[in-house]
Amino acid sequence: MPLSDTDARKLFDDLANALVEARLKWVVDQTQEQIDFGKFEEKSVAQLEEIARSSAGDVPVDVGSYEVRQKPGKPVKFSTTRPFTGTESVQLLIDAVSRAVEGLAAIESTIVSEFGELGITGTIQFIDDGETEPAEELSIRDDRKQAAVDQLAEALSAVREIL
Amino acid sequence: MPTIQQLITQIETALGTSLSPSMATSSAACDLYEIYVLSIAIRAAREEGAAVRFELPDGSAAKTLTFRRSPGHIWSHAHPYSHAVIEFPSKPSLEAHVGIYVSGKSGVIHEADLAILRRDEALTCRNSNVPPRQSKIIAVVECKFYATTLGLHLARGFMGLCTDLTARNVYFVTNTESATAERLLSHHRRNWERRVEPRNAREVERLRNTFQTAFLNFQAMN
């Protein structure tokens, strides 16, 4: 049975807390930003037109103090957003973790392999002009890390099945 | 079937072991992604028959690669930043740099996540402490690594970059996707590619082919 919206939102919070603990707050932040923006969708809408009070013999559409009626013709498409459901929010967070961890792990392996073919046998490091020590270093990922990435993928897949 | 709590525990355990420094911040992930896109460009050049090697600013061969974490000038000697040298037979040599400033048509200086330019221009710039001119650049790539859908503002920013560089040589590449950003870029006929990461072979191949076409055109015109 699919999760209720309340359960899905609790799952989102639990998962988000685990990610923050694991130093992946940026993944949670990006996901939350997307959730705050809302889900993009197109909506067909009947256009309205304002009518003069003198011609109010037509049946007016009630939109507060204005007197309007539905404009003849086909509905038109508007781009809009709607709130994400709890389940959709969890789905977004799972996809985000997958991109950040599984995606970057695959990228690291590819870089090491591709540059290895060009004779790069040492480390790959990142440093800024003003720094004295590299902020990050990249070397061949060990089997233990890859096993953990695979385990993560498996767990994320199981969560997807619950939704 | 495991409970939700068991799955959360499994995720926590896996995260504890699987993370590397490049996953710790958004900017570190972006740094790594730029290098990944460079690797695709290099692969494309090799597929087109180029010899590729890594070099340090003084011209010596690089065994350890050093890249910038934020944009800098091509002539910087703060650290031995590496670049790739791309040589097609009987053609002018090229260099590929990550995170350098380049000069647009207006003379305004822009950041280029990845820039592939003529080597003679790069040598001139390193010698005279000036940024490369857009007319000497074969390709500029804007690389965006995001965990979620891209914000539209990123595509809008890219549109601005295209107006001051030669638009046909400028590419927007991301690991993720965005219906609105893609619609905007397509509508304005910009070069873009989405979902580029090793798990998506089709998209990676399409980007590599795009770079191969850019190298093919360079060879035809030089």
Image (cartoon, rainbow, N blue to C red):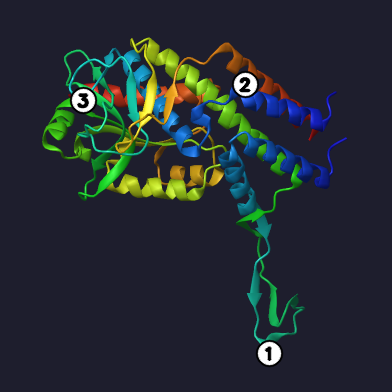
If the image is split into quadrants, where does the C terminus of chain B sit? top left
Looking at the image, residue A122 lies above or below residue A163:
above
Q: Which amino acid, by three-letter code, is at mark 1?
A: Ser
SS under mark 1 = helix
SS under mark 3 = loop
Residue pictured at 64% horizontal, 19% vertical? A148
> Mark 3 falls within which chain?
B
Q: In the drawing, does residue A84 fall left or right of residue B122?
A: right
Residue pictured at 76% horizontal, 26% vertical? A158
Q: Which mark is residue A15?
A: none
Distance from Cα at disc 2 to Cα at disc 1? 71 Å
Q: Which amino acid, by three-letter code, is at mark 2?
A: Val
Q: Are marks 2 and 3 on the same chain?
A: no
Marks 2 & 1, CB-CB < 8 Å contact: no
Q: In the drawing, does residue B93 fall left or right of residue A146?
A: left
Q: Name the residue tied to disc 3.
A: B57
